[in-house]
């Protein structure tokens, strides 16, 4: 039988599917069969390494199969590499689809953010405001910040934007309490990457972005869950306008993002990811550091100022690559990240430290970027700033997280668990525990108003001041105030947030216990 180009390419893609399923699906299974991943994928590896050459040159079949393999591999790595940008770009597109675009539009979750807002690991225990500022369209922008916020400016790669150096402190990204205004509020001047105008020597905290679009993120604190008016009112004092053109500025709008509507701000898990990546590439600046990886994009048909038009067969391949990359990212966060140096907060316990090394670029080694840390974080979270990463006593925040119980088994929404928090939880502002969907990393849609508990909820304490929290499909009798509902047949993970962590957290004289099954 004569094998046509189309038929052989179909066979080639089939081999990719088979190999992908063998490698990725088996990799996601915990405590699976004794066979190693290499053994399970041996058929695919043997097929590739055994590709035919005649007289020193590849056969037509080899050209087809290895070209597809090259595209597949580069697509997978492009997905993982670009996660910080596309996680953020998905948020931007999702927000602007609902609320519109413009520097003057700042959505506020006035009633707190619940599971109807689909976004990676949000905190329901603060008042959120998130905006997207286009410095390419509007030029340099001034942001007048409210007092008392925990805020940040990130570029579209989720890198904290370089700010001023004041009294020996180099500020990057942080705004408000951890920023140069120290929580008093102030005027910030955001400059685009190609800005060539004059820069004021006083009156502004100047931040220069490496991307044209900037992520503005305010978090405001409340003391009483029944009265959110003060933090909401504070956020609504924000002013944003083009530099030197305040009198002609568009009026600020603060659309209420809370309510009945569902807002999807999640990045795609399939081939649609590459369409979004292309939109990002067309809109954003080119940085020399990214040229090699943009070469990967060139291989799969994504290139600045050129139309992305993959063939039907290439779309099938890109879809397979995206699905594989997404699943790989979940293997990384659940299995590889804890094995990194400093990947666990406490010896013999399950609490994971994504930011081991205290480096916002995941480059604490000084010799490489830790891609396990980077991928793990951006597949399940957004926003990056020193206040989240660097150890700051009585300032910033820390985020111990786990997807496993004390026995090392994944958390199961159909089972009941308890978590013991010793007395004197070392969080000067407040602490919270939140549950998240293990696949999307969005807040667990568990039927409760919010999938979390926090200090302001005033959970019942034990006689010694310690607190026992409960997770499961049904509340233990009499423990309803200390219970987070979970969903049967769905896995989840939790994050323990400590805002303004105190010394006892850092010297580990205070440690949360592992999550334990309740029999």
Image (cartoon, grey):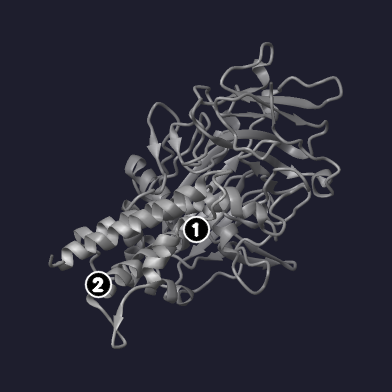
Residue shown at 57% from the left, 49% from the top: 34
100 shown above or below 481: below
Q: Position of residue 136 (x, y in %)?
A: 38, 64
Label 1's element?
helix
Residue shown at 67% from the left, 73% from the top: 366
Q: Position of residue 269 (x, y in %)?
A: 39, 48
Residue shown at 51% from the left, 33% from the top: 113
Q: Quadrant of the C terminus?
A: top right
Q: Quadrant of the N terminus?
A: bottom left
Instruction: Assess disc 1: are there few (<14), some (14-19) or many (≥20) residues with their C-alpha within 10 Å of its C-alpha.
Output: few
Q: Residue furthest front?
A: 1
User: In the image, 368: left or right of 500?
Assistant: left
424 shown above or below 192: above
Whether residue 498 is visible: yes
| Quadrant in the rendering for residue 223 | top right
Q: Disc number at residue 374?
A: none
Q: Are marks 1 and 2 in contact (CB under 8 Å)?
A: no
* Of 277 and 420, the residue lying toward us: 420
Label 2's element?
helix
The CA span between labels 1 and 2 is 25 Å
* Of 7 and 180, the residue lying toward us: 7
| Quadrant in the rendering for residue 70 | bottom left
Q: Position of residue 238 (x, y in %)?
A: 52, 45
Q: Position of residue 200 (x, y in %)?
A: 55, 69
Q: Residue furthest bottom?
A: 55
Whether residue 214 is visible: no
Q: Residue furthest top?
A: 477
* Disc 1: which residue: 39
* Of 296 and 265, the residue lying toward us: 296
User: In the image, 512: left or right of 112?
Assistant: right
* Disc 2: which residue: 61
Earlier in the chain: of badge 1 and badge 2, it is 1
């Amino acid at each position: 039988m004569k094998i046509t180009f189309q038929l052989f390419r179909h066979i080639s893609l089939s081999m990719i599917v088979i190999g992908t399923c063998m490698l990725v699906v088996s990799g996601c299974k915990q405590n699976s069969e004794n066979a190693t991943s290499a053994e399970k994928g041996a058929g695919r590896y043997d097929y590739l390494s055994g590709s035919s050459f005649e007289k020193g040159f590849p056969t037509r079949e080899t050209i087809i199969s290895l070209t597809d393999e090259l595209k597949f591999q580069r697509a997978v790595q492009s997905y993982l590499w670009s996660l910080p940008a596309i996680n953020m770009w998905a948020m931007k597109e999702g927000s602007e689809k609902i609320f519109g675009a413009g520097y003057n539009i700042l959505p506020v979750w006035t009633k707190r953010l619940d599971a109807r807002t689909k976004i990676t690991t949000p905190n329901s225990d603060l008042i959120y405001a998130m905006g997207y500022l286009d410095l390419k369209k509007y030029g340099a922008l001034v942001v007048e910040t409210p007092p008392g916020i925990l805020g940040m400016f990130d570029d579209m790669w989720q890198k904290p934007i370089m700010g001023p150096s004041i009294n020996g402190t180099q500020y990057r990204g942080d705004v408000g309490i951890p920023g140069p205004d120290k929580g008093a509020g102030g005027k910030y001047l955001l400059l685009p990457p190609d800005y060539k105008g004059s820069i004021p020597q006083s009156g502004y905290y100047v931040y220069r972005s490496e991307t044209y679009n900037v992520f503005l993120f305010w978090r405001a604190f409340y003391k009483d869950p029944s009265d959110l008016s003060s933090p909401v009112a504070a956020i609504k004092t924000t002013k944003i306008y083009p530099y030197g053109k305040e009198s002609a500025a568009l009026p600020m709008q603060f659309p209420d993002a809370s309510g009945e509507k569902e807002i999807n701000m999640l990045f795609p898990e399939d081939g649609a990811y590459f369409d979004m990546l292309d939109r990002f590439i067309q809109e954003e600046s080119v940085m020399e550091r990214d040229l090699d990886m943009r070469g990967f994009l060139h291989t799969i048909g994504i290139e600045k100022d050129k139309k992305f038009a993959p063939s039907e067969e290439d779309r099938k391949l890109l879809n397979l690559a995206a699905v594989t990359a997404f699943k790989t990212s979940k293997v990384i966060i659940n299995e590889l990240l804890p094995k990194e140096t400093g990947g666990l907060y406490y010896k013999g316990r399950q609490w994971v430290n994504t930011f081991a090394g205290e480096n916002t670029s995941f480059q604490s080694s000084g010799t490489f970027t830790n891609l396990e840390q980077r991928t793990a974080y951006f597949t399940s979270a957004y926003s990056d700033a020193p206040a989240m990463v660097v150890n700051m006593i009585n300032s910033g925040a820390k985020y111990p997280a786990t997807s496993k119980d004390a026995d090392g088994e994944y958390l199961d929404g159909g089972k009941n668990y308890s978590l013991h928090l010793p007395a004197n939880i070392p969080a000067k502002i407040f602490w919270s525990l939140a549950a998240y969907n293990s696949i999307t990393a969005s807040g667990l849609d568990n039927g409760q108003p919010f999938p979390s508990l926090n200090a302001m909820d005033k959970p019942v304490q034990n006689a010694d001041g310690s607190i026992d929290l409960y997770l499961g499909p049904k509340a233990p009798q009499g423990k309803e105030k200390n219970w987070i509902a979970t969903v049967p047949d769905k896995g989840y993970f939790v994050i323990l947030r400590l805002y303004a962590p105190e010394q006892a957290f850092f010297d580990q004289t205070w440690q949360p216990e592992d999550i334990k099954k309740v029999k």
